[in-house]
Image (cartoon, rainbow, N blue to C red):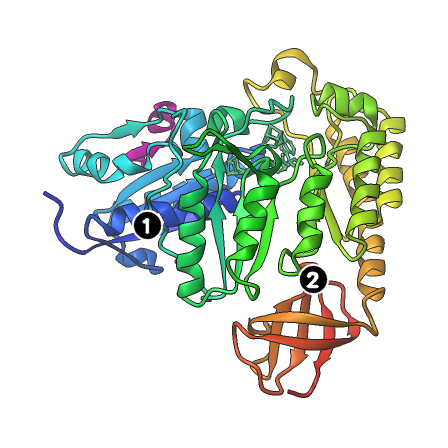
């Protein structure tokens, strides 16, 4: 039997999907007498929700485990690894990391209470079985990082894309979509609880497809419209779009609803068609530019962000130049840029050579970051003098006299308080910017 009211401390690494999963995990555990704590020293159970996307993401977790090891020498505590590293390394983690008692993959979270009970009996416990169907549809996540304004809603799990560099299909399994009704119910619950913004999550939201009992298939554009129609004051965001699948239908759905945010995350990965082909991305540079043109045509006020990889296998200086020129052509508002990191089992690790020297990867990455800094600054400067509707998220980092919040375009704005409250929409006139945020003044209310 589990004793009542044990305390769980959870650290979450990786993507938004992991944040959302940690909320599912806490909800499962709450049903079995666990309460969450943010003080590790008082926890009976330490969980690390891990990411395998790049080597350094895993190294960070290994570093944390050393610290937990020291803690475990001082007192009794269960340490569990969950998420993508658990799935990738399986039992091997128990051998490599003495401190670990529990290894649970992303599709096995319902079994956590049972597995913890095994550890209570003095055993180690592992469940890394992937599922073709699990979506945790019936589990209402415990919103733990909650400002009560903004929440993630997972609409699908897994990925079928097999991009050559990517570990996600191996750690998350096959793609499956959650039922429309359970998504709408969850969003409705959030609205009832006072939330003002939801982000619909999937590795490739454009391939969302759920078969209704009457046999009709609900696609992403339809789901998006149904979520947006629940409340005109609910902001709806989503991530991630895949350029090969992002349809005009989705863009028109966005255009029809003011509350679907003007912000699209469209990872390009590279500007070179040769690289894109090797990456198994199923689009060309021209196709990407066509999708970009469609966004500009249908949603002229949308911000576009992207992901880019520097130094993928065989990348030449010319390929790299093509990425820089794509960035310039698209004028991204924001970009996440990474050095290629070879991941075991992926197509690239099996079939290609990781032949771009590290110092070349670094130099290319730095060049990309420098260019993006210029583009991001231009993007912010072009907002100066305009007025935006901003959803207030809380005090600014700098001062309790200032609010911070986001525009529909997902740009952070900081402005002096003149009334307003967390979770309210206000009009903000942008008067300037720093490297990270817009600065503004609230219109009188
Ligand atoms: N499903 C999303 C996000 C995947 S992970 C998508 O398809 O876009 C987020 C980003 O990490 C990817 O877009 C990619 O730019 C980067 N990434 C993935 N694998 C990587 C690797 N092996 N090395 C470096 N960056 C990688
Ligand atoms: Fe990885 Fe590609 Fe799937 Fe994104 S779409 S998770 S990059 S395999
Ligand atoms: Fe990382 Fe897994 Fe997300 S590998 S990026 S936590 S799906």
Q: Nearer the viewer, residue 387 or 398?
A: 387
Report x, y in % for residue 203: 57, 36
Can residue 191 be seen by looking at this rendering?
A: yes
Label 1: element kind: helix
Q: Residues within 10 Å of mark 2 (few under 14, many from 20)?
A: some
Question: Residue 64 magenta-drawn?
Answer: no
Ligand 1 lies under 8 Å from the Cβ of mark 2: no
| Residue at 35 percent of width and 54 percent of height | 142
- The stretch in magenta equals 91-104
Q: In percent of the image, x 79 and y 49: which residue is there?
A: 298
Q: Which residue is the extreme one toward the top?
A: 351
Q: Which residue is mark 2?
A: 411
Residue 128 coordinates in the image, percent (x, y): 35, 26
Figure check: 414 above or below 256: below
Contact (Cβ within 8 Å) of mark 2 with mark 1: no
Name the residue nearer the viewer: 182 or 396: 182
Residue at the (73%, 26%) spot, across then down: 312
Residue at the far left in the pictured view:
1
> Which residue is located at x 61 percent, y 80 percent?
402
Q: Is residue 92 covered in magenta?
A: yes
Instruction: Give the secondary structure at mark 2.
Output: loop
Point out residue 199 in the picture as x, y percentages from the top left corner.
54, 52
Side (left or right) of 40 relative to 291: left
Residue furthest to the front in view is 214
The first of marks 2 and 1 along the sequence is 1
List the residue tagged with mark 1: 26
Q: Which one is nearer the viewer's eye here, 260 or 329?
A: 260
Question: Above or below — where is 185 with respect to 276?
Answer: below
Q: CA distance from mark 2 to mark 1?
A: 30 Å
């Amino acid at each position: 039997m589990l004793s009542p009211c044990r305390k769980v401390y959870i650290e979450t690494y990786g993507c938004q999907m992991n944040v959302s999963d940690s909320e599912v995990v806490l909800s499962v555990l709450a049903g079995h007498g666990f309460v969450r704590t943010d003080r590790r020293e008082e926890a009976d159970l330490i969980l690390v929700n891990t990411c395998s996307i790049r080597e350094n993401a895993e190294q960070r977790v290994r570093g944390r485990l050393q610290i937990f090891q020291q803690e475990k020498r001082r007192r009794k505590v269960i340490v569990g690894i969950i998420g993508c590293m658990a799935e990738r390394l399986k039992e091997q983690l128990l051998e490599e990391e003495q401190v670990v008692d529990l290894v649970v993959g992303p599709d096995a979270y319902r079994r956590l209470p049972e597995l913890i009970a095994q550890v209570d009996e003095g055993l180690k416990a592992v469940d890394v079985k992937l599922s073709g169907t699990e979506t945790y549809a019936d589990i209402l996540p415990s919103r733990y990082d909650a400002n009560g304004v903004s929440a993630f809603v997972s609409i699908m799990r897994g990925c079928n894309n097999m991009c050559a560099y990517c570990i996600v299909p191996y750690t998350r399994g096959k793609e499956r979509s959650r039922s429309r009704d359970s998504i709408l119910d969850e969003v409705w619950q959030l609205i009832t609880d006072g939330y003002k913004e939801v982000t619909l999550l999937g590795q490739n939201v454009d391939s969302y497809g759920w078969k209704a009992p009457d046999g009709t298939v609900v696609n992403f554009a339809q789901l998006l419209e149904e979520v947006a129609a629940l409340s005109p004051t609910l902001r709806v965001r989503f991530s991630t779009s895949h350029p090969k699948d992002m349809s005009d239908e989705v863009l028109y759905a966005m255009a029809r609803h003011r509350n679907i945010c003007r912000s699209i995350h469209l990872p390009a990965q590279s500007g070179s068609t040769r690289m894109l082909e090797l990456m198994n991305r199923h689009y060309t540079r021209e196709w990407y530019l066509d999708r970009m043109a469609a966004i500009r045509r249908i949603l002229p006020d949308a911000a576009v962000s992207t992901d880019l990889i520097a130094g993928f296998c065989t990348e030449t200086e010319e390929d790299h130049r093509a990425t820089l020129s794509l960035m310039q052509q698209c004028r991204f508002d924001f970009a996440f840029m990474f050095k290629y990191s070879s991941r075991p089992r992926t197509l690239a690790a099996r079939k290609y050579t990781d032949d771009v020297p590290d110092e070349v990867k670094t130099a290319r990455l730095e060049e990309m970051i420098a260019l993006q800094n210029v583009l991001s600054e231009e993007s912010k400067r072009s907002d100066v003098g305009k007025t935006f509707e901003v959803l207030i998220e809380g005090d600014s980092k700098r001062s309790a006299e200032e609010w911070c919040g986001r525009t529909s375009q997902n740009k952070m704005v900081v402005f002096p308080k003149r009334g307003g409250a967390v979770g309210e929409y206000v009009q903000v006139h942008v008067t300037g910017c720093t490297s990270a945020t817009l600065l503004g003044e609230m219109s009188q209310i």
